[in-house]
Image: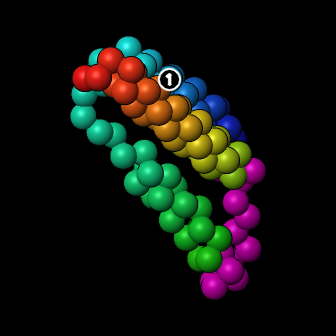
Amino acid sequence: MLIGPVLAIYTGALVLYSAEKEFERWKFYFIGRHPGEIYVALWTVLVFGLLVWSFVTNDGYKMEPEIISTYIVVLGVLAITKKSKSMFKEIKSERVKQTGL
């Protein structure tokens, strides 16, 4: 089945994109906002929508394990980037206090 390789490529692209954005944040190149929470919310709606649809229609649809794995990776990337953002703000705040700017 093709879904495994496609989701592996997707996961790799997501991780690279997130890493690049974090690098930009820490090197002060960050311009604008990219609301990752909305992206994760859409993934959540998709995954749970499929589960509810399967339950309601009782059509025997079985979600591929790769989809669940990819959803977990998406949640993990969000958690890591949120922690990084929090650390960045804390360090930036400390620098401002030290320099008085």
> What quarter of the picture does the C terminus occupy?
top left
Q: Quadrant of residue 44?
A: bottom right
**Residue type beneath disc 1:** Ala
Can residue 59 be found in the magenta stretch? yes
Task: Work out whether residue 48 can be spotted.
Answer: yes
The residue at 39%/20% (across/down) is 98
38 and 29: which one is in front? 29
Q: How many marks?
A: 1
For disc 1, the neighbor class at 10 Å (few under 14, some 14 to 19, many from 20) is: some
| Image position of 26 with respect to 6: above or below | above
Q: Is residue 62 above or below residue 33?
A: below
Q: Residue at x 52, y 32 (%)?
A: 87
Quadrant of the snapshot with the N terminus: top right
SS class, disc 1 = helix
Q: Nearer the viewer, residue 51 or 23?
A: 23
Q: Which residues are magenta?
A: 54-67
Can residue 14 be seen from the camera position used here? no
Q: Residue at x 59, y 43 (%)?
A: 79
Residue 5 drawn at (x, y percent): 64, 32
Which picture quadrant has residue 73?
top right
Which residue is rendered at x = 65% and y = 71% of the image? 51
Question: Residue 81: percent from the left, percent from the top?
Answer: 52, 35
Q: Is residue 99 left or right of residue 79?
A: left
Of the pair 31 and 90, the residue shown nearer to us: 90
Residue on which the image places disc 1: 19
Residue 92 appears at what percent x and percent y? 40, 26
Indicate whether residue 6 is drawn in magenta.
Answer: no
**Above or below for 101 versus 77:** above
Colour pattern: rainbow
Is 13 drawn above or below residue 65 in the view shown? above
Q: Which residue reaches farthest top? A: 27
